[in-house]
Amino acid sequence: MPQMRYREALRLALREEMQADENVFLMGEDIGVFQGAFKVTQGLLQEFGEKRVRDTPISENTIVGMGVGAAMTGLRPVVEIMTVNFSLLALDQIVNCAASIRYMFGAQVSVPMVIRMPQGAGHQLGPTHSHSFEALYLHVPGLLVAVPSTAADAHGLLKAAIRDDNPVIFIEHETLYGRRGEVPENAEPINFGEAVVRREGSDVTIIGISRMAETALKGAEQLAAEHAIESEVIDPRTLRPLDLDTILESVRKTNRAVIVEEGWPHGGVGANMAALIQEQAFDWLDAPVARVAGGDVPMPYSKPLEQAAFPHEEHVVSAALSTFRDL
Amino acid sequence: MTIENVTPDLASEGTGVAGSPHPLPSRDTCEKVLEKMLLVRRFEERAGEMYAKAKIGGFLHLCIGEEATIVGATQALRDTDYLMSTYREHGQALARGTPSAEVMAELFGKATGCSGGRGGSMHLFDMKRRFLGGYGIVGGNLPLAAGVALASDYTGTDDATLCMFGDGATNQGTFGETMNFAALWSLPVVFMVINNQFGMGTALERHSAVTDLSQKSAGFGVPGARCDGMDLLDVHACVSTALEKARGDRVPQLVEAVTYRYRGHSMADPEEYRTKEEVEKWLGRDPIAAFSKRVVEEGVLGEEEVKRLDEDAMRAVDEAVKFADESPFPDLSSLYDDIYVIGDQVRRPYWSTDLRSPDTHRGEEERQAGEVAHELAELGSLHEPETDEQQREARARGEGG
């Protein structure tokens, strides 16, 4: 099975879908001549030309809005926003247009577009380039939200996103771009709403979002080695739709749940998911659902502060242990 | 600057020639455009009445006074061209051919409305006639219009897009961003500022440093022109020329139509920001009265014919009100329909993608329950969990928690 980096898997998906459908085109800041701020689109301008790989001015709201307009009238735009924080400039077009248009116009039209953006801390980019906003987009009916954490998922989910007729917020992670993983030959699209069990275990369920799926896995190994606790680690892969079935099935087995995310705690993915778990599996829980989230702060620049502001495996371990405390 | 100063001097624009107006078109065309302007006027008057009777909710933005601008511009479009507008867009939908009954039904929130009752007054839409919507966010439709024009260009068609917005929208970031994009990518789009001289209640000279709005796009590479928005023929000539340049030469254009809305910003507008005298002055330039007078004076239509057209318009609006009144509201069970396109990624028409479990697909159960869902929704308790008793019963059956 071929090994490739997360960014190469994304590029492969873009290339395959562009080859398959000439209405698929890319637009974004510095995706062409510059080859992409994170080199995801490297070589695609040379391969597909300026009509299909479009460098844009720095105008996020209008980039997204033009994608919506083009999607309403027959094209399948894949828009790249350079960093998740910049997507806030496009929140109007994402929420008021992309997510709402089909519904508010009585299903006369659809918006088949993908908005890709990288998020996350770890590169010392400070408070305007390092946040995690999956919770923001999860909040909006009309959007689909993908948060791939491996090369294979990045590839398969992006292919599915491009082929789907709904607007998709596709959240990549900056620190995962260089991560290698196996991507099967001729891999098919991966369906949204299908979680993956990354590690099987019977003592506690740990749900990791985006890069935190990896952190959760490391925490699980530590829990096994040092505390003889076998964790089941679940990567939901998409948040809208969410495969709650797989999560609940696991919780009914382990009776404990820990949710790990990189974003802010208030109104976060974990807050929402904890509510869903207690609504639907309250009687199976032996402890309150535990949440591990990023610090409730704008992301600081200084390396030690930044490292302290997002979760690491030790936070996962202590949160998991807390679910074994006597109540 | 005073209002007098923003009244266009047509001599300087070359579209109309001051003192010698555009020649009247054929009798048929004169009849058609007068019919449309009268329909828009009578429709809006009745919509205002229906709002006062609480048949219409939310905000209601009437375009009375802007009929020449709307009809003059839309008459310049081909059937295959796209039109986008703002939340003051009943006239645009009607001028594009959306049946007045479907527009009125939408204002009434009925299932037969042109957006299925989902959008209301501010969000009319008619894909069949390529009227791509009213938009409730000031300046929000400009990027979309450029995207539509991009699709037209990308797929090698000859279609053009006409994007209308108000004077207030020229202050939004999307205005500059979209002008730059359209010029940079040579898109077949015409931007049209309907300058009714107020951004809600703030007068033009109080909201825009440059009050000749036709100048605001030039720095981005989009040439601008100005026309008399109270003169249907001048608007038509100016927009036709602009469409030709956008379509043929791939040079996007801006057209400013200087007009005036006779009613408030919305029905909830005390109009404390303008004087009675000012309104009176503009009422003296009523675009429908002026056009009617001219066609009669030049012997193209008789006074009786004009009167008949007006009566036809009133009858059509009566029928629209009747249709809207008699139409059903959307079924409550449709509340969660069409948020998503059902397909590989959203596989079932569930109403909320994250409230699912194997045991309680609550949305679907409520839909299946039909009457129960209706009652629950009417009680405003659609989101309430099952009762304690129901939960106990379910547990006794070994189902769920």
Image (cartoon, coloured by chain):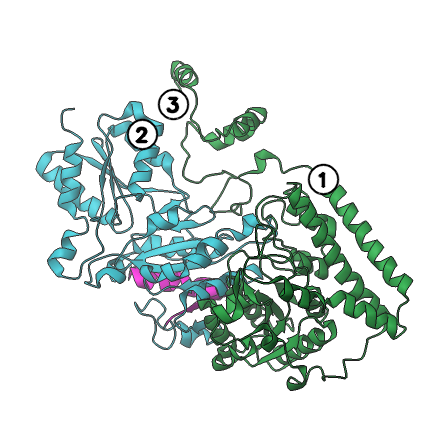
Chain colours: A cyan, B green
Closer to viewer: mark 1 or mark 3: 1
Tell me which label, 1 or 3, sits earlier in the chain. Answer: 1
What residue appears at the point 49 percent right and 30 percent down from the top-left corner?
Answer: B382
In three-dimensional space, the C-alpha distance between marks 1 and 3, rounded to whole angstroms, equals 45 Å
Q: Which residue is mark 1?
A: B325
Q: Position of residue B310 (x, y in %)?
A: 82, 57
What residue appears at the point 49 percent right and 42 percent down from the top-left corner?
Answer: B347
* Left or right for B301, reference A217: right
Q: Amino acid at mark 3?
A: Gly
Q: Which residue is mark 2?
A: A278
Circle 2 chain: A
Q: Position of residue A207 (x, y in %)?
A: 27, 40
Asked if badge 3 and badge 2 are on a common chain, one would say no
Q: Residues within 10 Å of mark 3 (few under 14, many from 20)?
A: some
Vertical comparison of A279 with B208: above or below = above
- Pick the front one: B64 or B145: B64
Q: Residues within 10 Å of mark 2 (few under 14, many from 20)?
A: some
Q: Is residue A17 magenta?
A: yes
Circle 3 chain: B
| Residue A227 at least partly seen | yes
Q: Which residue is mark 3?
A: B400
